[in-house]
Image (spheres, rainbow, N blue to C red):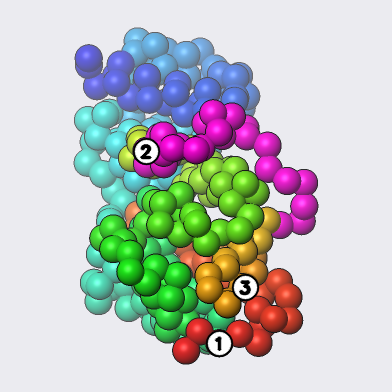
């Protein structure tokens, strides 16, 4: 497949993901509908600036914008900087402050594939208690944990399960689930006892303001809802894909419970 055909095919996929007509996208990007049609069909090879402009109009995630540029024969422009790199020091510092200041309630840092990158001390203690005697996967992954070793201790799993699936689709970077996350979803949804209806992205969750997660083990019973923080105006792939999830107590018993 030529570079023109490859990038045109990817742009068409993203346009359909966004449920836009060629006319609507052309109007947003301020390009000729005829030229856009030629780009998508591979009859015209888009310039680097055209790819960047169309990707912005389609709100394509930075990682996938790099893939569009590569498909068009151009070098990627967005870096994927390790979180430990000195250039990420301001973001590292902000993340540490948020994790620390959220004590005495749990908070966790996640990547785009729901892997746990960091936790505050309370979250560490909570997971240690709930997972006592269980060997968790490394790195710990929220989907694998909730659908796996934590499942017996989630007393409202019938609500949390479909709610979490909806979250995966809703909070996917750019609103589109990537192949690796899709494979992870397929893995956990194939586990025993998972209703077949949950395998759809439009699975129905309870119509409540939020779906708390209720943990109970031994004599401890707690209930939390969460709020998610992301980096504003990111220009780096790593920065865009970070999510910091802070848990808040639903009831007085949870508010007064201390994990350590």
Q: Nearer the viewer, mark 3 or mark 2?
A: 3
Q: Between residues 70 and 125, which one lies in front from this camera angle?
A: 125
The reply to whether residue 210 is visible in this rendering is yes
Rendering coords of residue 148 (x, y %): 41, 52
User: Tag 1 or tag 2, which sits nearer the N-term?
Assistant: 2
Q: Nearer the viewer, residue 210 or 40?
A: 210
- Please give the label number shown on residue 222: 3
Q: Earlier in the sequence, mark 1 or mark 3?
A: 3
Mark 3 and mark 2 lie on one chain; the one further toward the N terminus is: 2
Left or right? Give the position of 80 relative to 59.
left
At mark 1, the secondary structure is loop
For the record, the magenta segment spans 184-210
Q: Position of residue 179 (x, y in %)?
A: 35, 35
Residue tagged 1: 258
User: What element does badge 2 sit on?
Assistant: helix
Cα–Cα span, label 2 and label 1: 34 Å
**Residue beneath disc 2:** 187
Residue 171 within the segment the image draws in magenta: no
């Amino acid at each position: 497949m030529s570079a023109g055909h490859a990038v045109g095919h990817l742009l068409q996929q993203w346009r359909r993901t966004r449920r836009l007509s060629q006319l609507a996208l052309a109007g947003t990007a301020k390009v000729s509908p005829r030229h856009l049609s030629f780009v998508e069909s591979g009859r015209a090879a888009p310039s680097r600036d055209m790819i960047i402009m169309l990707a912005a109009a389609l709100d394509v995630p930075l990682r996938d914008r790099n893939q569009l540029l590569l498909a068009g024969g151009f070098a990627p422009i967005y870096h994927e900087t390790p979180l430990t790199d000195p250039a990420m020091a301001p973001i590292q510092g902000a993340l540490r402050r948020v994790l620390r200041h959220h004590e005495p309630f749990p908070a966790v840092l996640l990547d785009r594939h729901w892997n746990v990158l960091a936790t505050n001390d309370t979250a560490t203690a909570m997971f240690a208690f709930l997972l006592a005697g269980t060997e968790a996967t490394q790195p710990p992954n929220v989907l694998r944990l909730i659908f796996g070793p934590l499942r017996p201790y989630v007393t409202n799993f019938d609500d949390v399960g479909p709610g979490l699936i909806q979250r995966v689709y809703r909070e996917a970077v750019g609103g589109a689930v990537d192949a690796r996350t899709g494979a992870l979803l397929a893995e956990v949804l194939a586990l025993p006892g998972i209703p077949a209806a949950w395998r759809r992205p439009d699975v129905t969750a309870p119509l409540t303001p939020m779906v708390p997660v209720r943990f109970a083990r031994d004599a401890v019973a707690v209930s939390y809802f969460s709020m998610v923080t992301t980096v504003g105006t990111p220009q780096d792939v790593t920065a865009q894909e970070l999510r910091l999830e802070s848990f808040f107590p639903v009831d007085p018993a949870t508010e007064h419970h201390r994990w350590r």
